[in-house]
Image: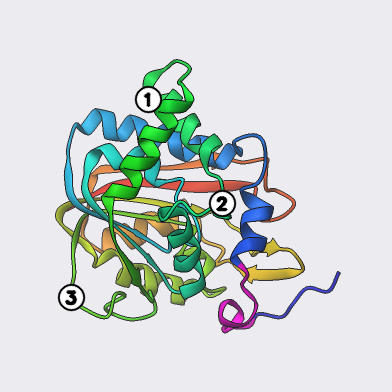
Amino acid sequence: MKINAYNPNIYDQQWNPQEYLRQYYSQDFIPDDEEAIQQRLVAFLKHTGRTFARAIDVGCGPTVHMHTSLAPYVGELHLADYLPENLSTIEQWLRDEPDAHNWDINIKYVLELEAESPVSDSAVETRKQLMRQKVTALKRCDVRQAQPLGESAVYDLVLSAYCVDAATNSKDEWRQWMGNLLTLCAEGGMAVLLSSNKAQRYQVADNFFPEANVDETDMAAALDAAGFNQRRTMIETVPIKTWEELAFNSIVIAIVEKG
């Protein structure tokens, strides 16, 4: 298979949300990278006991599974992505359209983490309704811009998973664009960040998309430069097996407080 040379416009030209969902979110099991982040996200939200008035998922792609654990802890949730086709895919799920992607297995996994016991199908339906209620805005964003949302805006909680690290193959651009992303976190706010670790590219169908080859040290430096509290920072590198042939063999998870 031919590996594509890096094309900075590859997402505009070759991204297909349905291919991405088929490749990474159509298994009958929970991939180990999702296990790792959801376990830590559930524990973090329970431990803080904090309700966040406004939260945003930056670079949400065509996915909603990460919002399962957030829904009980946020007043409202905004979803932001560069590609309108990703937001359209999410809209299908929000409207509960028949051909929308089915996230039930992912939602059930989170609920069982929360409850520490099996949960019913009705509990899954109840959480889906809550997730849909909490989403109050879908926004276009571009982390390459100093104001990624095209306006001055801050949030009490910022979630971003596989976003900036997958936007470029340049570590210098990654540093700059991470800085742009982190301006969205309010003083005293929290950020939950997930990236690949030392990855060069990831595959969707026959296309290869960029990775910035960043690691835990790069993440810590970016957070420090953006004014996050080193004493209230958890950064961890976790080995991953599910995607080692398609994307990466480890990930970086950061849960941090600004100021």
Q: Residue furthest front?
A: 98
Residue 136 sits in quarter: bottom left
Compared across the picture, whether 207 is left or right of 209 comes to right
Frontmost of labels 3 and 2 is 2
**How many residues crowd mark 1 within 10 Å: few (<14), some (14–19), many (20+)?**
some
Q: Which residue is mark 1?
A: 114
Furthest toward the top, the residue is 117
Q: Position of residue 105 (x, y in %)?
A: 55, 35
Ranked by sequence position, the earlier of labels 3 and 2 is 2
Q: How many marks?
A: 3
Asked if residue 83 can be seen in this view, the reply is no
Residue 108 relative to residue 50: left or right: right
Q: Earlier in the sequence, mark 1 or mark 3?
A: 1
Q: CA distance from mark 2 to mark 1?
A: 23 Å
Q: Residue at x 27, y 49 (%)?
A: 134
Q: Residue furthest right?
A: 1
Quick check: is 11 in the magenta stretch? yes
Residue shown at 38% from the left, 76% from the top: 142
* Residue at 43% from the left image edge and 61% from the top image edge: 91
Q: Is residue 238 left or right of residue 202?
A: left
Q: Which residue is mark 3?
A: 152
Question: Magenta span covers which residues?
Answer: 7-16
Task: Name the residue carrying label 2.
Answer: 101
Dot 3 falls on a residue whose secondary structure is loop
Name the secondary structure under disc 2: loop
